[in-house]
Amino acid sequence: MLAAAASVLLVAVAAVVGTVIQRSNGSLHVNLPPLYASWFPHLGPGTPAALTVAAIVIVYGPPLAARLTWRALVPAGWAAALAWTWSLALIDGWHTGIAGRLTTEYEYLTVIRRFDDLGPALRDFTHHILNNAPDHWPAHVAGHPPAAVLTFVGLDRIGLGGGAWAGIWCITVGSSAVAAVLIALRALTDEPTARRAAPFLALAPAAVWVGTSADGYFAAVAAWALALLALAATRTTRAPAAAALASGLLLGLTGYLSYGLTLMALVAAGVLLITRTVRPLPLVLAGAAAVATAFTLAGFTWWEGYFLLVERYYQGAAAVRPYAYWIWGNLACTVLITGLATVAGLRRTLAAAPTALRQQLRRPPRTIPPAPPGPTLLRTPSDRLVLLVLAALIALLTADLSGMSKAETERIWLPFAIWLLPATALLPAARHRHWLTAQAALALLINHLLYTGW
């Protein structure tokens, strides 16, 4: 409770200090610090559905998560997250909440026709990143490697063009991250831990932004990459080699969806640390290298694009957005996307971290007869959970310190935030409904009081 109260204070201070700064010199370039949002109290067609989904998950989520078979729980978690995300998005209406989100002047769909001839468009991609370049890309296209916009080009090519299909894609794929995290948790910790986390993953406040941006889709790709890596490392799948290769392909794709998501390598390293094995690593690296090679041969060089992005970044609002504010203001945004329950879980995570790290550094005990080859996991599931959450937290803090995440982190950090939510499994089971209520209330308040536009 003290940790949750401290996080509320952090958000309040970020809001007050940010408002003072914004009104004095406009340097934050956000209307409602620390969020990129506007004050807009409203109801919408999604309001009854959102209240209903929240009530069902709060009342029935914990017992169902404990009783359902595992094969039923994973799709049920995805379905609940899908219903939660859809209902929150529809609070803003069909066009404003879904169909029009990716059609604004900053977004990917505005340049689809420029990719009619794919080869020249990729070879010429970096020539349009800078603001002073001819026919420069809009902000979100310039700010990401080409796999991001190519996703929507691909949808258009198969007859699913336009903002409605793009929104449906992002919500459907983005909410599948819940299933991926559940699978990874079961492999890396144990099934009871994954079951305790399931309702919190389904009812995450992050769903507000999964339903309004492509970053939820990016988060899902990264989550499935790590889930496959967990299956390969723990050898809890019939084809660990195929899982390792698929993980590498998805990790490679993640790096070509967003430059900053190369930091997911830190979370992947955490998975290998937990399992005390590098057996999947060669195939993972081979898969990632295959993606990088394909894009390079097609004419796009990742490093060239990244350095041009850094230059473009400081041609815009980032040049004046104060690092001294955003380095902690970003953390207030993280509170708002993960919720008070996650903050409480993180307090327990940090308290348990020294013990978990000591356990990890100890030499594995010898067994007679010798243990069969395979990963040697930490003794307790909670220790393994702590290390996984800690790896995600380190990745997020690295992004924060880099200075390349000043504002808008409520959507940009979704791929990291989804791995902080499992910390809720450390909370006392008797209090889960109380914490779920706090999670739902936060998301409902944000979506009904603010307009989270991009």
Image (cartoon, rainbow, N blue to C red):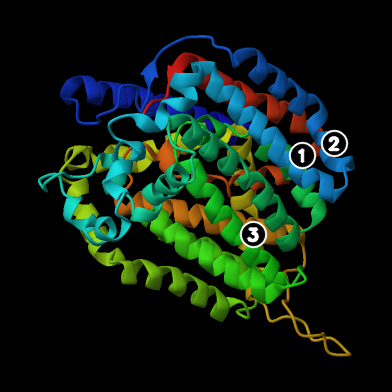
Q: Quadrant of the C terminus?
A: top left
Residue under numbered circle 1: 76
Residue ID at (60%, 79%): 278
Which of the two residues, 72 or 451, is positioned nearer the viewer here?
A: 72
Q: Quadrant of the N terminus?
A: top right
Per the image, label 3 sits on a secondary structure element best described as helix
Residue 98 in view of the camera: yes
Q: CA distance from mark 3 to mark 2?
A: 23 Å
Is 135 left or right of 405, judged from the image as shown? left
Residue under numbered circle 3: 227
Q: CA distance from mark 1 to mark 3?
A: 17 Å
Q: Amino acid at mark 1?
A: Ala
Residue under numbered circle 2: 64
Mark 3 or 2, nearer chain start: 2
Per the image, label 2 sits on a secondary structure element best described as helix
Residue ID at (85%, 36%): 64
Task: Looking at this view, name the residue that lies furthest to the top.
Answer: 42
Is 14 left or right of 181, judged from the image as shown? left
Q: Amino acid at mark 2?
A: Leu
Residue 353 in view of the camera: no
Mark 2 or 1, nearer chain start: 2
Residue count near mark 2 (Cα–Cα under 10 Å), binned few <14, some 14–19, many ≥20: some
Per the image, label 1 sits on a secondary structure element best described as helix
Residue count near mark 3 (Cα–Cα under 10 Å), binned few <14, some 14–19, many ≥20: many
Answer with the quarter of the image where residue 85 lies.
top right
Residue count near mark 1 (Cα–Cα under 10 Å), binned few <14, some 14–19, many ≥20: many
